[in-house]
Image (tube, rainbow, N blue to C red):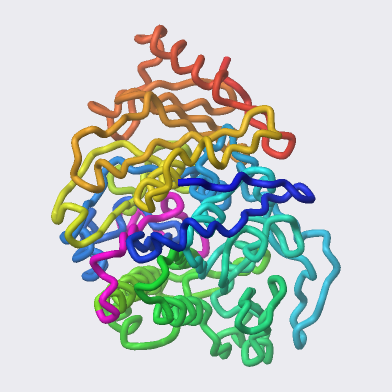
Amino acid sequence: MDYKSISLVGGTLLLSALSANAQKKNSQPNIIFILCDDMGYGDLGCYGQPFIRTPHIDAMASEGIRFTQAYAGSPVSAPSRASFMTGQHSGHCEVRGNKEYWRNSPITMYGNNKEYSVVGQHPYDPDHIILPEIMKDNGYTTGMFGKWAGGYEGSCSTPDKRGIDEYYGYICQFQAHLYYPNFLNRYSKALGDTGVVRVIMDENIKYPMYGPEYQKRPQYSADMIHEKAMEWLNKQDAKQPFFGVFTYTLPHAELVQPEDSLLNEYKAKFDPDKEFKGSEGSRYNAITHTHAQFAAMITRLDYYVGEVLKKLKEKGLDENTLVIFSSDNGPHEEGGADPTFFGRDGKLRGLKRQCHEGGIRIPFIARWPGRVPAGEVNDHICAFYDLMPTFCDIAGIKNYEKKYRNKEKDVDYFDGISFAPTLLGKKKQKQHDFLYWEFNETNQIAVRMGDWKLIVKKGKPSLYNLKTDIHEDNDIALQHPDIVEKMKAIIFEQHTPNPYFSVTLPE
């Protein structure tokens, strides 16, 4: 098939509409990627969670593949999402941390509430293509609902500039610390938007962001984002393939939601419960019933997933839609969350912000009736940067690296390996020689090579054998200096300098 090449105008990738793609719209499968926020490996019933009901996600696992060795792109949100979007690991990707762009912007007011006039994180490289742009270039309509975290407002990398047809949610992940925010962001051509705009929560801003009065705010963002996602999904049909990215903020702190039967169920279950005194600087309000709040947030998310799958069936799109569910990184301790109570690390060591298994190994479930084997538990080792080549394979996009590599760059990295053969029950699955992570905020680097796991903290390497030591308790670096040197060589080969995100290379 003849695809036109990418053109660079003003430093931003512009993709031309391809008439050849119109001929295959009816045969291309739809793809929905549901990405939740800070859910640990052990937070779902199908991964062994004993306290929290997740019937719809558990059913999704029984109807598809549940992966046991899938990894996020990073131990925190923005770079993990960047890995998914760019097909790059965090040694090559532009976004490698949660760098903010709001702290020094002028203040604007919503009622009596102070806000920042510009919010968001470090932008994706405008000269490297991202996944929605590829999908759009190949005949897909694209929708994204939830966190963006790939560029600040007005930057070179916002949804309207990066291949998203319709968007609703939080451009800035710091804003997403509030579930009853002052505003959300939107981009909708149908409503006449020419760029990302702010949608003011008129009912919320009548009350303060912090303190007892905050509880009177009625506009709950998680439900609102899900409703917009469902409205978009309801518009889709079999005439044009669609690519949906539902980046739900649940179950990230703050631990708060509507006082309904779902929450009351867990309040009765966890009694007595713990309290959290609040943290105004992080925008986390004081709450009671922290365990009940957290559990109900996950079950609420489960209902969202159930509604997505139900809608696909209602519309007759179920058998032509691949749905993948995952989390952006491991569990957190913010806002009163208590991962120890729930056993949230799934017997893995470490939490969010750490390159131990608990910070990066995540739940990962794929469902596609009639195509993805049902009821399978699979130990294929994959990472978020494998999603780009996998989705390209599923969509019938051949040689995506050659077609979309920016020839103006000295090196334009694509680090992923398609796991479409695994999804489709085929035997010829290519394996990674290694997986790679780095994270500047805790100054950590990690490499997985087979069962070997090397973690470098502030330049000091430690070695673990995951086959016999899944909890990474026994550092055996001194017993295997040859393995350490081999894995250090991978780090020196894979790490590229980045002026915004620096790490200490191993000794």
Q: Residue at x 50, y 81 (%)?
A: 224
Q: Residue at x 63, y 80 (%)?
A: 211
Q: Is residue 317 magenta?
A: yes
In x, y percent, where is residue 179?
Answer: 54, 75
Residue 244 in sight from this viewpoint:
yes
Q: Residue at x 64, y 86 (%)?
A: 201
Residue 360 in sight from this viewpoint:
no
Magenta stretch in the rendered image? 314-343
For the view shown, which residue lies furthest in the right direction?
Answer: 106
For the view shown, which residue lies furthest in the top direction?
Answer: 482
Q: Is residue 15 magenta?
A: no
Tally of numbered discs: 0
50, 246: nearer the viewer: 246
For the view shown, which residue lies furthest in the left direction?
Answer: 375
94, 288: nearer the viewer: 94
Q: Relative to residue 53, is residue 431 depicted above or below?
A: above
Q: Relative to residue 332, is residue 295 depicted above or below?
A: below
Q: Does 438 sit left or right of 310 as displayed?
A: right
In x, y percent, where is residue 500?
Answer: 72, 39
Q: Relative to residue 418, is residue 18 depicted above or below?
A: below
71, 409: nearer the viewer: 409
Looking at the rendering, in which quadrant would you find the C terminus?
Answer: top right
In x, y percent, where is residue 441?
Answer: 62, 41
Q: Relative to residue 229, is residue 425 depicted above or below?
A: above
Q: Does 73 sit left or right of 190 as displayed?
A: left
52, 500: nearer the viewer: 500
In x, y percent, where is residue 92?
Answer: 59, 34
Q: Residue at x 39, y 12 (%)?
A: 483
